[in-house]
Image (spheres, grey):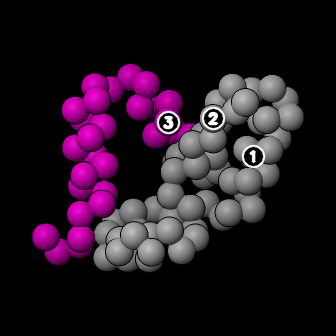
């Protein structure tokens, strides 16, 4: 089993979640294409890796940093990225 953490991906997820007008819904998802996320997840599974951050470099960096920062800071960052723009 491989845990896949893709971060924002260019799919309809943010539209369906009513998050079109958020930082993550407008900007973040443009860095990762669904095919690349799926391929990296599949490749990690085949290699027997337990975990993979895919696909953009920013997602990989954020994943590495997330292991070093307190949960309260991560929560605050996620809240900021998911708030409607202009609020």
Give coordinates of residue 62: x percent, y percent.
46, 40
Badge 2 density bin: few <14, some 14–19, many ≥20, Cα 10 Å: few
Report the residue at 24% width, 70% height from top.
84
Badge 3 density bin: few <14, some 14–19, many ≥20, Cα 10 Å: some
Let me know if residue 53 appears in the view: yes
3D distance between C-alphas at marks 2 and 1 = 11 Å
Let me know if residue 57 appears in the view: no
Residue marked by disc 2: 3
Judge whether residue 84 is colored magenta. yes
Indicate the quadrant where residue 34 lies.
Answer: bottom right
Q: Earlier in the sequence, mark 2 or mark 3?
A: 2
3D distance between C-alphas at marks 1 and 3 = 15 Å
- Look at the picture and state if 10 lies above or below 39: below
Give coordinates of residue 13: x percent, y percent.
50, 68
The magenta region covers 60-87
User: Are the residues flagged by discs 2 and 3 in contact, CB closer than 8 Å?
Assistant: no
Residue 49 located left or right of residue 76: right
- Farthest left residue in view: 87
Checking the image for residue 62, the label placed there is none
Report the residue at 80% width, 44% height from top.
42
């Amino acid at each position: 089993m491989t845990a896949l953490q893709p971060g924002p991906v260019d799919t309809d997820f943010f539209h369906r979640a009513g998050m079109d007008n958020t930082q993550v819904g407008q900007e973040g998802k443009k860095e990762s294409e669904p095919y690349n996320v799926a391929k990296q997840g599949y490749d990690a599974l085949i290699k027997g890796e337990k975990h993979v951050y895919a696909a953009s470099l920013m997602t990989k960096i954020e994943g590495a940093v997330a292991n070093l920062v307190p949960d309260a800071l991560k929560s605050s960052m996620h809240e900021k990225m998911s708030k409607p723009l202009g609020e």
